[in-house]
Amino acid sequence: YQKRWVKLDADYLRYFDSEKDAYSKRFIPVSSISRIASIGDQKFEVITYNRNFVFRAESDADRNEWIRTLQQIVEERKSKAPERTLMSSTTNGAADPADKSGCLELRGFKHKLFVAVAGDKVFLYKNAEDYRLGIGITYIEMNVGNVKEVDRRAFDLTTPYRIFSFSADSDQEKEEWVEAMQQSIAEALSNSEVAERIWAVESNRFCADCGSPKPDWASINLCIVICKRCAGEHRGLGPGITKVRSLKMDRKVWTEELIELFHQIGNAVANQFWAANVPPSEAITPTSSSQERRRFLIAKYREGKYRRYHPLFGNQEELNRALCAAVTTSDLAETQALLFCGAAVTCATGDPQCPTPLALAEKSGQRLQMEFLLHNKTSGKSCPIEAPAAGLLKPIASGLPSAILCHAEFSRRWCTLQDGVLSYYENDRNAVPNGEIRVEEIVCLLHPTTHGHPASPFPLSCRIESTFEVYIESERLYLFGLESPDSAREWLKSIAKVGYGGLWVLEGPRCHDADGSHFSLAQSFVHPRAEELLALDFKRLGRLHYKGGLNLEQAKEGWFALAGSALHVCFEDGERQEPLQLRKLQELCGCPCPTTGTPQAGAGGRASGVAGRTLYIQGERKLDFLGWVHAIQKAAGSCGDTLSEQQLTESDVPLLVDRCIDYITQCGTCRLTSEGIYRKSGQNSKTTSLLEMLRRDARSVCLKEGEHQVDDVANTLKRFFRDLGDGLFTGQWGQDWLRATALEDEEEKISEYRRLLSILPTVNRATLKALINHLFRVQRFSGENQMNTHNLAIVFGPTLFQTDGKDYKAGRVVEDLISHYVKIFNVNDQEMKKQQDEIMAIMKMREAASSGTQQAGDFICTVYLEEKKTEAEQHIKVSATMTAEELTFEILDRRKIMMKEKDYWSCFEVNEREEA
């Protein structure tokens, strides 16, 4: 017997190595347990349909308690006869089909494991036989998971508790596994409350088209519940026929009225109309292919091949008259039949007080009729993304001036913003719109820019001077053009504030337009708590889901605005945070789910880590999410030639400078002591190429031994400072630094240098300190590298002041800064001690190398014991042959920590700068 920590819940009996473990050694589905028997000596046996497990408790009383509890749960499960959990076994041992299953290699296991992705979990089994029996090793809850591709066939599933490193047999297999796990994450992050309420109706528990159980998608205008595979084909029909939404992810759509509408109509009533005459040979099943589904759905909904025709079919006038009568009653089935047999949802009623069927339903108090009509207002019409609406814009009751701008490749449309609906018409005389955008469906707005937004998918030929773009939930993008940026911004603000900004005339709980039509009060795009974002000069404004801090279980909603290189966030709970400075971003990796339309950014590989903070972002739709990723990547890059426009470290030093200094300092025995460092010039072509790569994206450049020579890197650093816009000392204060060299009193001169240092911009000040700190180290090895303080000053004086070298004062400034580094930069004892320790370690390594005892590839590494604090750090020489175990014992020995039995110490390499 081996002692194990055992947990029992309603679905599984699991055992673990210890109570602290997150993942089990084995799980047994409760549904597979046939009986539990006592076999004496504190032991009991769990008998499944295929295998027996023997447990021994610590006492007879404990054993009896386990038996009683197990029997109670098993009996409860049998008596209630619930649907089986996703991966439980039936009496014949067959397991439910998974979204994706097969064999994968998992680091730490000698043999391949059988892995199954099912719903919001990933299950691990020893082999396919165990999978068939339903008895596995463990399962991973994907609400805290993240998938990251590692190399050609490998990928990591990361959780806060463990990293599962998988390898597939091929690139294609890897892509399929990554996609399946990303979809599982999306499902895990969704909300099941709406789904459970809609599934309360028996017919809604199965797909209206193929009969698959537990469908979690819906067509909100047809009022049917459908499975994920059918939902993909519904999207292909277009929103003019079917408007697809998720029961679990599109939470804003599901109002009380819409949920009640699905109770009243739902799959049963809808199929009595749409599927009244389906021949058995043409029906589809859960196993039908995508082609078969597409063919069936086109016939069912686009062609109406199987529908039950209304007796008035073909007589437009009679259909319209019957619709006006039906909406005043509670007969939703009649309204459905009339509407989808040709009645016009906006037909004239002949009543001046109630000119539309919607107004008649309102007057009669028929809430559900109103809801049904609203969702079908644009049925039969669509506005494809290939023909964006733009041109003539004039909002009603908004107080904005009208504007007109035409482009040969744009379609001129008359647009109105009223009652939470942005409508566009063929011209200002038309009463029926070509299309509409409901404000609550908007997920993102793009600020007008010259020639269109750089992240826009529209080609340059389609862009005009002043534009703004609107992304909506159905993955459509609309591009609008106006005559001036100010007009475009006015429109954006009005759209964003609709519902809270005074654009509506409120009468009780509903809103009325000028001709008496009535509309439900829509939710605004930007919440009142986030209205401060509208004051920003934003490039992109949108609604995203996020996770951050210590609470990674459930994604929350937030409003994000990208302004310059800062990402501003207003959270759901009203919490305010400092804007994220994207130039200090450490990592951004977007992983959209290409087939489900539920892109996301999440843990690990999909996180943007900025200055010690990590924000996990989940987009609502693929197009919108990819736009955010592109925009953030652009904002996080260098955008000019001044210091403040560069990618920065957390300490405000340009990443380019940090990369070069770090490369020269690391593995110091051969680089920092290289003879003539900074005096010798590297190869011009290599310097030019390296500088170009670092300027473009220093975050992605990894300087490696063998690939880059020390003189090329040193020359790159010098050329960066020489070509720097406005210089390191700035054009405003540069001459004052040079004049300070004339001061004869040394203390007075140091004081002046300190004053000038204090008035430099933050990034310039931090960069100057980092550079002088580096040069201070270099001159400490002047015996080997022949670069003393004076020689370094001769090289760097003209470089930093961008002069021709004839003015000796530039060199004097640099020489003074290095000589008085401690006083001028106010270096404290702790910083000085750390630097001295590093210098001493390098000198010892140099001595060891000269004596022939140095191993190739030795370098100095800073190791922290348990926490990253100065008092917990140790500098250690790491040889090419040193193992993690040896390094661990070395540190513990230095700190005089005795290893105890059952103590476990781990050594981790932290990639703070994304280097290999």
Image: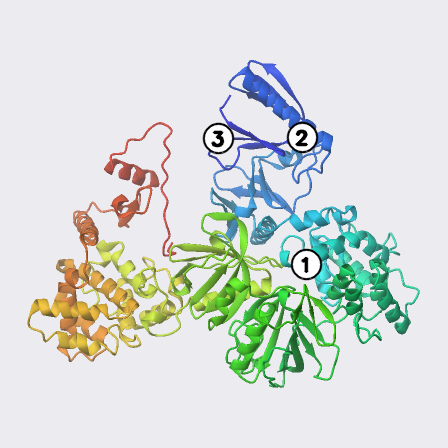
Q: Does residue 153 appear left or right of residue 348 in this picture? A: left
Q: Give how far apart the Cα atoms at labels 3 and 1 are.
A: 43 Å
Residue 312, image x and y in percent?
A: 92, 67
Q: Give the mark toward the camera: 3 or 1.
A: 1
Camera-side residue of 112 and 532: 532
Task: Name the N-terminal-most of marks 3 and 2.
Answer: 3
Q: Residues within 10 Å of mark 2 (few under 14, many from 20)?
A: many
On the question of residue 50 being in view, the answer is no
On the question of residue 447 being in view, the answer is yes
Looking at the rendered structure, the kind of residue marked 2 is Ser
SS for dot 1: strand
Q: Which residue is mark 1?
A: 245
Looking at the rendered structure, the kind of residue marked 3 is Asp
Q: Give how far apart the Cα atoms at labels 2 and 1 are.
A: 36 Å
SS for dot 2: helix
Q: Which residue is mark 3?
A: 17
Residue 163, image x and y in percent?
A: 47, 44
Q: Residues within 10 Å of mark 1 (few under 14, many from 20)?
A: many
Q: Which residue is mark 2?
A: 32
Task: Name the N-terminal-most of marks 3 and 1.
Answer: 3
